[in-house]
Image (cartoon, grey):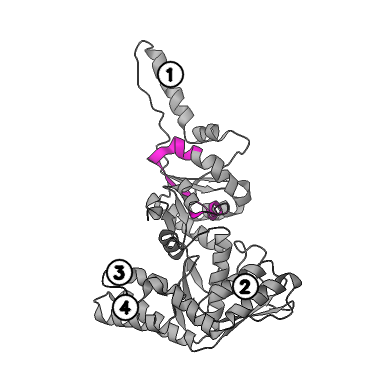
Amino acid sequence: MVILKKVTAKLMISLLILSSCASSPQNYKSSNSADLDKFSPKQSHSNRDLKADLLEFLSYQKLDSQEIKFLHDRVKKKEVGSDLRNLADEFIYNAQLLTTQKSYALNVNAQDIYSREIIEIAYKMALPIQLQWSKDSKIGLPDSLILGKLQGFCQSMQADVLDSLKNQLSLFPQSSLIIYSNRYRNAVSALRDSIPGVEVIKLDNSKDPQEFAAKILGINQSINRFQVITKLNPNQKLQFIPNPRSDISQLILLFESDDYKLFGPALRYHGGNNFNYVNFISSMDAIGDPKQLLDYEGVQLPISSLLLSKIKNGSAESLEKIVERSILQDWMLLQAIKKSKIRVAKIQGMTGLISYKRGSCAKREIPLHRVHSSWFST
């Protein structure tokens, strides 16, 4: 259900169309039923991984009572670890609390630049979200959903991604190299504070990508050493493959989206399999078709387990503005949970694993997943 109050003229037509569809209880139920086809109890669950199914439920987008009862029965009958059982029991209890409430009102500023996205997400969510629009709404969204801290979360999306990069840097504290665009100089400062002494190089956009990569990865030095050796014995024919720096094992890349297209391939060409490559969240900006992720094959990206699952099963048909839309969806879900009687919850959000506790801000963990061609093999 979507309610309109003091909405702008630009949103009037689209909002009325969606309202007419979403306000009917029959439509609400059929929407859930359609989403649950692949998880229907009519299918054999004996070969399904309970942990994988629970990932879908913890997104709080599967709230059909029959499916929740079936999950409860599976947990009771199956021998599962205590951690998995506790997560399932917590979800089942929370789902009952969520579904007892008829609707969840969400006050949003009618002038917000993300108004259209909010309407579309509310229409697709499993929960009956009521959007109450007003120019005087105190709950405004920041101009940048990535840089700004949304209400209910402890940190911004960028800060949470930086925490993931800090954890990754701690695995190779003495052998990591950070390469960054000028736009992310403040983010790099935060990373340097966590790992003092880590090597940092600013990206030089004026240089040819191949030349830049060869220089910073030590390829030019390797070639120079070979030339010196061949001069000592010019009659001897030697096979030579330039070797990149041996003191570096990991490259952390904080580029703008266009720079990934230019400098990313050059760095991987000269670095080969000698390095672990990690991209920043900005590498997702220019991706529309999910298969474009194959341009980053072998590279670690900040992608939530839920989004990765959707990519693998083909339900994520487009990744256009996926970061912003994921942030909005998790924020809207969090607002509904805050209005319920839920005390604690583990949420597999579109942005990452969210830990909610009533009276506290929600913490978010964003995993790093290595892109692999098998994601698109089905």
**Distance in Å between CA atoms under marks 1 and 3:** 61 Å
Mark sitting earlier along the chain (1/2): 2
Amino acid identity at mark 1: Val
Q: Residues within 10 Å of mark 2 (few under 14, many from 20)?
A: some
For label 1, the SS is helix
Q: Is 286 within the magenta? A: yes
Q: Is residue 220 above or below residue 348?
A: above
Q: CA distance from mark 4 to mark 2?
A: 35 Å
Q: Earlier in the sequence, mark 4 or mark 1?
A: 4
Q: Read off the residue under disc 3.
A: 48
Q: Nearer the viewer, mark 4 or mark 1?
A: 4
Side of 220 where 74 appears, left or right: left
Q: Which residue is mark 4?
A: 85
Q: On residue 5, which mark appears?
A: none
Neighbor class of circle 4 (other Cα within 10 Å; few <14, some 14-19, many 20+) is some
Of marks 1 and 2, the one in the foreground: 2
Task: State the residue at coordinates (53%, 76%).
Answer: 334
- Nearest the viewer among 131 and 43 is 43
Q: Label 1: which residue?
A: 228
